[in-house]
């Protein structure tokens, strides 16, 4: 199949591309062109330019659109709300309009941040109530998708995606904690913010299973273990034999936007649909350690 992947230089897209590129024809787009190791061309496309998007889509006629592009920084979205709304909501609406008129399947990456954190664990059908602007834009995007009665869609809700990264990717919870601990530097991990850390290697497998099994609706694509960030850091120290005394507890997040304290997602229904098992952090860390040791 011909699959368009937006946000191709982003972290979530990286493993999706690696997993799918031998099985499908991939068309990759990004807001800016950066060095990468996909082995595939990346087309520059501003998703907030409706004319450019419509022209590009009509030229390539994809069977599936996997939409990973978004402003994902919670603090940045809180400060730059107009920009966040344009990319996280209006661009989704434009892509959905195209998909609904062409029977193109729309696979959208959302977030656990659509929930308040007060009533975890959350099922696929739990009522969202975001407490920051980023979460609000992602909820608005989900609502745009679900209200389009002619749209074939799948919504993936991952949580705290982590693993090794390429030089052109931003840091992630594992990479940042590991590199600081390895350098003998103090790190701070929240003891009050819980989630389902999700190994990057499982993201591509998840999307592959969604396509193979034709899974539609809402999917909680998350890891099977509930941890706060302090516990996550301690586990890194244990597996990689690093100094756990460098890990200090944090009780209040210093960011500009409020954070939900408990975003644990119930994933069991989604796992049955996908027919796969997501890695626990300990399993993932052992995998990462083996990779590091060659």
Image (cartoon, rainbow, N blue to C red):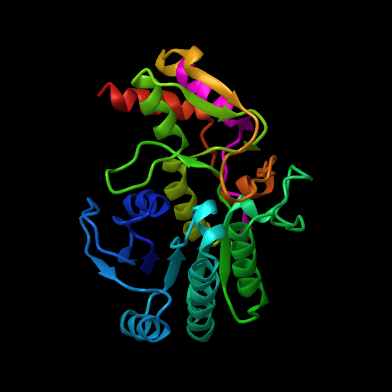
Q: Quadrant of the C terminus?
A: top left
Q: Nearer the viewer, residue 213 or 110?
A: 110
In this picture, residue 45 sits left or right of residue 209? left
In magenta stretch: residue 198 = no
Report the span colored magenta: 217-238
What percent of the width, then of the height, locates residue 272? 63, 46
Q: Is residue 282 above or below residue 9?
A: above
Q: Nearer the viewer, residue 280 or 82?
A: 82
Q: Is residue 227 visible?
A: yes
Q: Is residue 75 above or below residue 284?
A: below
**Residue found 63% across the figure and 52% down from its top:** 113
Q: Quadrant of the N terminus?
A: bottom left
In magenta stretch: residue 224 = yes
What percent of the width, then of the height, locates residue 283? 48, 26
Q: Is residue 109 visible?
A: no
Q: Is residue 225 above or below residue 62?
A: above
Total of numbered circles in the picture?
0
Using the rendered view, name the quadrant where residue 156 is placed.
bottom right
What percent of the width, then of the height, locates residue 252? 64, 35
**Residue found 41% across the figure and 74% down from its top:** 47
**Residue found 53% across the figure and 77% down from its top:** 96
Q: Is residue 175 above or below residue 133?
A: above
In this picture, residue 33 sits left or right of residue 24? left
């Amino acid at each position: 199949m011909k699959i368009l992947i937006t946000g191709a230089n982003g972290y979530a897209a990286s493993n999706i591309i690696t997993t799918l590129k031998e099985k499908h024809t991939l068309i990759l787009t990004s807001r800016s062109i950066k060095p990468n190791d996909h082995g595939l061309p990346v087309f520059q496309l501003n998703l907030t330019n409706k004319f450019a998007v419509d022209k590009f889509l009509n030229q390539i006629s994809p069977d599936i659109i996997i939409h990973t592009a978004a402003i994902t920084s919670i603090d940045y979205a809180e400060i730059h709300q107009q920009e966040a709304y344009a990319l996280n909501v209006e661009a989704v609406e434009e892509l959905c309009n195209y998909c609904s008129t062409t029977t193109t399947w729309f696979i959208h990456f959302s977030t656990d941040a659509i929930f308040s954190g007060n009533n975890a664990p959350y099922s696929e059908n739990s009522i969202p109530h975001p407490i920051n602007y980023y979460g609000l834009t992602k909820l608005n995007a989900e609502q745009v998708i679900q209200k389009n009665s002619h749209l074939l869609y799948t919504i993936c809700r991952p949580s705290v995606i982590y693993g090794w990264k390429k030089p052109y990717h931003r840091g992630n919870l594992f990479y940042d904690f590991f590199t600081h601990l390895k350098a003998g530097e103090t790190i701070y991990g929240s003891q009050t913010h819980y989630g389902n850390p999700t190994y990057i290697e499982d993201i591509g497998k998840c999307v592959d299973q969604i396509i193979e099994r034709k899974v539609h609706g809402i999917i909680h694509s998350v890891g099977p273990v509930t941890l706060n960030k302090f516990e996550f850091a301690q586990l890194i120290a244990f597996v990689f034999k690093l100094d756990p005394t460098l890990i200090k507890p944090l009780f209040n997040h210093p960011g500009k936007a409020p954070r939900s304290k408990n975003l644990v997602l119930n994933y069991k229904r989604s796992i049955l649909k996908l027919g796969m098992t997501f890695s626990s952090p300990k399993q993932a860390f052992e995998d990462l350690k083996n990779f590091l040791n060659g």
